[in-house]
Image (tube, rainbow, N blue to C red):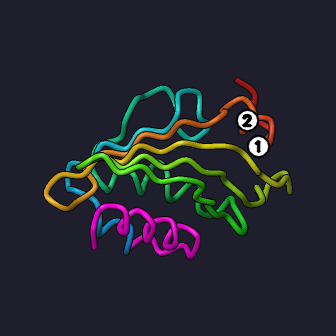
Amino acid sequence: MNNVQTIEQVYKWFSAGNAQAILATFDPAIEFRLAQSHPYRGDGGAWSGPDAVVAHFFMKAGPEWDDWSMEVIAIHSLEDIVVVEGRYHGVYKPTSRRIDVEVCHVWRFRDGKIAMFHQYVDTARLRVLMGRSL
């Protein structure tokens, strides 16, 4: 698979809840960064390594969402970088509110593995949906 195909597959695995397949695409030193003020991010910056991504993101977000998906609007490939414009869809279980929010992801590859993920999303809107204040 090329980088774009890998990212397309990662989104399918996210929707299916297949964390093991996603983790297999990660570089052991992956830098995983959610948007600033994202409810799952906490006070820190990026998480480093697949174990940190699982503990701080997958284990928290996975059980809280139903029918989560990433609608891909456009993919831009720049050698070892893939930029994805899209929309999140799904239902946040604790509030039963549906999400439909614009998002941008930046993925960086190293030696065929995902070495960096950076998310940009309207965190104020996400916090309202999730019933969480700043």
Query: Does residue 131 sit above or below 99 in this rendering?
Result: above
Asked if the stretch drawn in magenta spans residue 15, the answer is yes
With 29 as the anchor, is 6 left or right in this view? right
The x and y percentages for residue 83 are: 42, 46
Disc sitting over residue 61 in the figure: none
Is disc 1 surrounded by few (<14), some (14 to 19) or many (20+) residues within 10 Å? many
Asked if the stretch drawn in magenta spans residue 75, the answer is no
Judged from this view, the residue extending furthest toward the left is 111
Query: Does residue 88 sit above or below 2 in this rendering?
Result: above
Three-letter code for the amino acid on which mark 1 is drawn: Met
Residue range of the region highlighted in magenta in the rendering: 1-20
Label 2 belongs to which residue? 127
Q: What whole-number distance in Å separates the C-alpha atoms at marks 1 and 2? A: 5 Å
Q: Residue at x 43, y 66 (%)?
A: 10
Secondary structure that dominates the magenta span: helix
Three-letter code for the amino acid on which mark 2 is drawn: Arg
The x and y percentages for residue 13 are: 49, 72
